[in-house]
Amino acid sequence: MMRTGRLVYTCEPASKINSRISDMSLNGQPIQADKSYKVARWGVGSAQSEGEPVWDVVEQYLKSAPVVKNHTPNVPRLIGVGANPGFANE
C-alpha cells in the first residue's frame, strides 16, 4: 500500500483493473495526464535506481522546516466496501 500526502482520490476495489481509481487531485487541483509529478517512495520493493533515498530527502526537509505543518492524512474515498469487516471506520 502506498502512502500519499495531499493526494485525494476515489477507489472502487471491486471495479475492473484500470477502472478502480478516479477523481484524483493533488493540493486541490485535478491530476493532469500530460503533466509530470515528483514522488518519493519508502518501503520494500525494487532497488532504487536514481535520485536520493527518500529518508535523506525527509531528513533535509525536517532540518530546514522550523515547524512541520500538520495536514490531514490521505484517506481515499472508498466505494463498495461497506460490508467488508476489514474496514474499521465503516
Image (tube, rainbow, N blue to C red):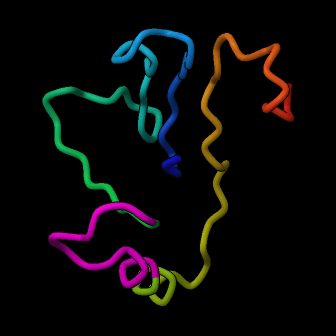
* Quadrant of the image occupied by residue 34: top left
The residue that appears at 32% across and 30% down in the rendered structure is 31
Position of residue 46 in the picture relative to residue 80 (left or right): left
Q: Residue 26, position in %: x, y?
A: 42, 38
Q: Residue 75, position in %: x, y?
A: 65, 38
- Residue 67 in magenta stretch: no
* Quadrant of the image occupied by residue 79: top right
The residue that appears at 85% across and 32% down in the rendered structure is 89
Position of residue 87 in the picture relative to residue 49 (left or right): right
- Residue 49 in magenta stretch: yes
The vertical placement of 79 against 4, above or below, is above
The span shown in magenta is 44-58
Q: Majority secondary structure of the magenta segment?
A: loop
Q: Residue 68, position in %: x, y?
A: 60, 73
The vertical placement of 53 against 34, above or below, is below
The residue that appears at 53% across and 47% down in the rendered structure is 1
The residue that appears at 47% across and 33% down in the rendered structure is 28
